[in-house]
Image: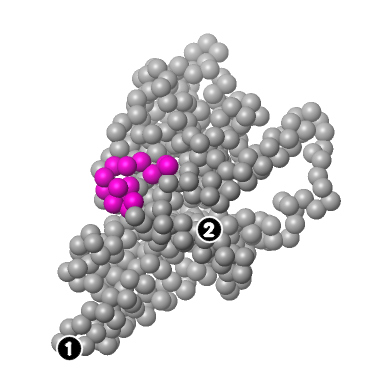
């Protein structure tokens, strides 16, 4: 794959037009003035029929799950869409295109939507029981409700499991949860929360305790959701803390219905999903930074001529274009991998994320440099791209953790 197909370009234009019409005029409100982004996201989902598609896929999945539970082979058409050649790639492309287009102006929208629909809804659809899927998943997949996936804690940093303090204790047929979570995307407004914590087990060292997950609802007794944090960037993605004080839950809220259903392996699979999407985010940001820089280099005059005539500026623009091409190729490679029904290795996913994050930071920083003093002003928009880019080097695993993941995967072969 070396370029988008004609149907994909049509979708790209439609999404870009939507963003220009609905997102750009409201950019200051959702980025800086504390307006939650969810109505804009819901409007986009309905505009492009993503809610209807999610509902259709949900119903198919539930039908298959129920057939398997009854000991029956799920009924399939002669050519099921999921098995047609290239369908996985087409689905991946249709996922990547909105991510790229939103990230050109408000990368935080992608984060808010991805965590709600992809991480939270995806965790329940991937590991939940049939009852849990029917009870919680569909409103998350359509963005009718907002979801949060809560693993990070104040003192855990990159050692998410080793330093995890939030704990669930068995209490009769249920559990009691205590602890806190921080840097939680959608945390302040989440209706449904997938909470990852440790299981308190007598005689088991804290580092060796099981990782378990629960599905929580906002308003539960003992659950407090903080106000949104003030952050360096991605203001359109509300982030906050969760505090749990003797939150009582039944076994029906234990994700997968078992203490072994969604532990370390399930959470790590979610990290893989996050890392693949970072390249698309970075591509959108780099595309926009390059466009703005080229336009400014043509229009801005110093010493009687456009600054784009200067070789140092030309070098910056040339390097930006190389970065854009590399990121686009990474996205196309991911789409092709999905089309062939394959999955990336941990090294590949982490390398993709590492390069994309560093490249976005480098390109947006250079864009600010091209703009000079004006680039430091909010009006230029390149300063927002630069601030937004920094989070790509931190969340879904820091650059340093990507390096470790890549090396360990290579050495283990």
Q: Picture coordinates of residue 99 (x, y %)? A: 48, 56
Residue 321: name its quadrant. Answer: bottom left
Q: Which residue is mark 2?
A: 96
Residue 256: name its quadrant. Answer: top right
Q: Picture coordinates of residue 201 (x, y %)? A: 48, 21
Residue 402: name its quadrant. Answer: bottom left
Q: Residue at x 19, y 68 (%)?
A: 374
Q: Residue at x 63, y 46 (%)?
A: 53
Q: How many marks?
A: 2
In the image, residue 398 above or below residue 121 = below
The magenta stretch spans residue 31: yes
Q: Which residues are magenta?
A: 26-39
Q: Which residue is mark 1?
A: 304
The magenta stretch spans residue 324: no
Badge 2 density bin: few <14, some 14–19, many ≥20, Cα 10 Å: many
Q: Picture coordinates of residue 146 (x, y %)? A: 46, 36
In the image, residue 61 above or below residue 86 = above
């Amino acid at each position: 794959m070396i370029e988008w197909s004609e149907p994909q370009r049509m979708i790209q234009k439609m999404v870009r037009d939507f963003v220009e019409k609905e997102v750009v005029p409201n950019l200051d409100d959702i980025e800086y003035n504390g307006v939650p982004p969810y109505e804009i996201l819901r409007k986009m989902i309905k505009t492009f029929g993503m809610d209807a598609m999610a509902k259709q896929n949900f119903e198919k999945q539930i039908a298959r799950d129920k057939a398997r539970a009854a000991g029956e082979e799920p009924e399939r058409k002669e050519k099921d869409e999921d098995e047609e050649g290239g369908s996985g790639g087409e689905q991946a492309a249709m996922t990547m295109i909105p991510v790229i287009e939103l990230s050109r102006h408000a990368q935080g929208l992608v984060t808010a939507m991805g965590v709600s629909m992809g991480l939270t809804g995806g965790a329940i659809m991937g590991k939940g029981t049939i009852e849990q899927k029917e009870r919680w998943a569909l409103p998350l997949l359509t963005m009718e409700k907002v979801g949060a996936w809560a693993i990070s804690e104040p003192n855990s940093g990159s050692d998410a499991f080793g330093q995890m303090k939030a704990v669930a204790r068995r209490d009769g047929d249920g559990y009691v949860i205590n602890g806190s979570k921080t840097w939680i995307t959608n945390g302040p407004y989440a209706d449904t929360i997938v909470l990852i914590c440790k299981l308190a087990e007598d005689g088991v060292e804290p580092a060796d305790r099981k990782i378990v997950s629960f599905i929580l609802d906002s308003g539960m007794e003992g659950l407090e959701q903080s106000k949104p944090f003030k952050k360096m960037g991605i203001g359109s993605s509300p982030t906050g803390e969760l505090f749990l004080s003797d939150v009582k839950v039944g076994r029906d809220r234990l994700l997968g219905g078992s203490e072994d259903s969604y532990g370390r392996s399930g959470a790590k699979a979610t990290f893989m999903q996050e890392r693949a999407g970072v390249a698309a985010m970075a591509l959108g940001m780099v595309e926009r930074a390059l466009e703005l820089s080229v336009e400014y280099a043509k229009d801005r005059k110093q010493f009687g001529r456009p600054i784009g005539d200067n070789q140092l500026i030309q070098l910056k623009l040339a390097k930006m274009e190389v970065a854009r091409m590399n990121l686009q190729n990474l996205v196309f490679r991911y789409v092709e991998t999905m089309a062939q029904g394959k999955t990336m290795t941990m090294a590949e996913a982490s390398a993709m994320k590492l390069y994309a994050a560093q490249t976005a930071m480098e390109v947006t920083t250079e864009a600010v440099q091209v703009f000079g003093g004006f680039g430091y002003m909010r009006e230029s928009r390149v300063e927002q791209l630069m601030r937004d880019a920094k989070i790509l080097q931190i969340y879904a695993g820091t650059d340093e953790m990507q390096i470790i993941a890549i090396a360990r995967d290579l050495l283990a072969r």
